[in-house]
Amino acid sequence: MKQQLKDYGLNIEKIPIKCDNTSAINLSKNPVLHSRTKHIEIRHHFLRDHVQKGDCVLEFVETSKQLADIFTKPLPRDTFFVLRRELGILDEQYLD
């Protein structure tokens, strides 16, 4: 991801990843394996490893402002329009 951003002329040291799950953010910051996290497969530790290396940083975002939801969930019309506007795609007036 860092290389692709460099190709577009953006040099970002720590890539911000917006997350609405505080438990996931805390797990990424804590390298200690807890009994409650033993069920997590090794492949899911990829993100935690990159946070520890300083490649990326997880930032909290409220669930209602999670832009990724527009790509992953069916949303109510109003929420869809708000997130779409935040992404800068289209304004409501063009759909009516």
Image (cartoon, rainbow, N blue to C red):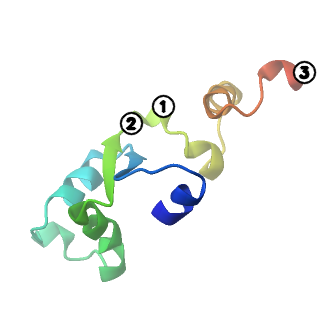
Please provide percent x and percent y for residue 18.
41, 45
- Identify the residue at image location x=67%, y=32%: 84
Amino acid type, residue under disc 1 in the picture: Ser
Q: Secondary structure at mark 1?
A: helix
Q: Is residue 95 left or right of residue 23?
A: right
- Identify the residue at image location x=64%, y=49%: 71
Q: Which corner quadrant of the image does residue 77 belong to?
A: top right
**Label 3 – label 2 distance at C-alpha:** 30 Å
Mark 3 or 2, nearer chain start: 2
Please provide percent x and percent y for residue 45.
29, 73
Q: Which residue is mark 1?
A: 64
Please provide percent x and percent y for residue 25.
26, 51
Q: Which corner quadrant of the image does residue 92 belong to?
A: top right
Residue 1 can be seen, yes or no = no
**Mark linked to residue 96:** 3
- Identify the residue at image location x=39%, y=47%: 16
Q: Nearer the viewer, mark 1 or mark 2?
A: 2
* Nearer to the camera, 2 or 18: 2
Amino acid type, residue under disc 2 in the picture: Val
Quarter placement of the C terminus? top right
Please provide percent x and percent y for residue 5.
53, 56
Q: Is residue 66 left or right of residue 72?
A: left
Q: Which residue is mark 2?
A: 61
**Label 1 – label 3 distance at C-alpha:** 24 Å
Q: Secondary structure at mark 3?
A: loop
Q: Pointers 1 and 3 in contact (CB under 8 A)?
A: no
Q: Nearer the viewer, mark 3 or mark 2?
A: 2
